[in-house]
Amino acid sequence: MFVALPWTPVGFNVELRGGQLVAGFGKWPELRVHSPGGGLDELIRWHAVADEVTAADRDRYNDKRNEFLARYQNSPDALFAFPSLREFPRVPTHKPFFDRLLLDHRGNIWARHFPPNGLGIQDLRPPHDRPAPETWTVLDSAGVWLGPVHLPGGFAAHEVANDRVYGVYTAPHGAQTVRVYRLVRED
């Protein structure tokens, strides 16, 4: 589906909902819902303050990069897969608010919080590391905040439907299995 977007940042998240497109760059706490013709149907914003990228975040990035390069030292693509901070034209000063969008069967919008150990460039987990616990902010189709959803460590969500979260669980020893969690609302 072709949709003319009014801006074109690199790496924005997009999900389709019926005939609409939901997009969010993640740098701002904002989502945009566009019609098939490209017009802006809805702008959803919420109040949040972005976390700064600290010297500790940069050090953690360099440590993870060194770990990755040591693990894949014979691979000619390793340097391209996990570049040095000096190779980026601009290292972000603040972390994105979210790094992924999902839409459930009711049209609710799920925005995954950017990992706290991230730098705003890429996920810092080397391959085969277990996913960190995920937190998602859920908004209804009109943009009303429904609440956060906290998922267990090792579980990476891929789909939300029928009041269940479907995804892949990575065990401490690296084995992966498909899991389904039922959503339970706490009052």
Image (cartoon, rainbow, N blue to C red):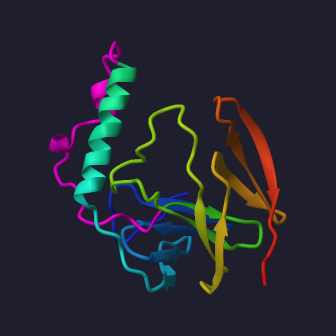
Q: Is residue 86 magenta?
A: yes
Q: Is residue 150 magenta?
A: no
Q: Nearer the viewer, residue 7 or 66?
A: 66
Q: Residue furthest top?
A: 74
Is residue 99 left or right of 186 when viewed as pictured? left
Number of numbered discs visible in the structure rendering: 0
State the image coordinates of residue 154 (x, y, percent, origin top left): 64, 45
Picture quadrant where residue 111 is located: bottom right
Identify the residue shown where x is 84% and y is 64%. Answer: 162
State the image coordinates of residue 113 (x, y, percent, origin top left): 51, 64
Q: Nearer the viewer, residue 178 or 130?
A: 130
Identify the residue shown where x is 67% and y is 51%. Answer: 158
Magenta range = 73-98
- In the rendered view, tell whether residue 14 sits above or below residue 148: above
Identify the residue shown where x is 41% and y is 65%. Answer: 25
Picture quadrant where residue 21 is located: bottom right
The N terminus sits in image quarter: bottom right
The secondary structure making up most of the magenta span is loop
Picture quadrant where residue 168 is located: top right
Identify the residue shown where x is 59% and y is 55%. Answer: 133
State the image coordinates of residue 52 (x, y, percent, origin top left): 29, 68
Q: Nearer the viewer, residue 113 or 110?
A: 113
State the image coordinates of residue 100 (x, y, percent, origin top left): 52, 59
- In the rendered view, tell whether residue 91 sits above or below residue 98: above
Is residue 42 left or right of 70 when viewed as pictured? right
Q: Nearer the viewer, residue 65 or 112?
A: 65
The C terminus sits in image quarter: bottom right
Is residue 70 left or right of 159 when viewed as pictured? left
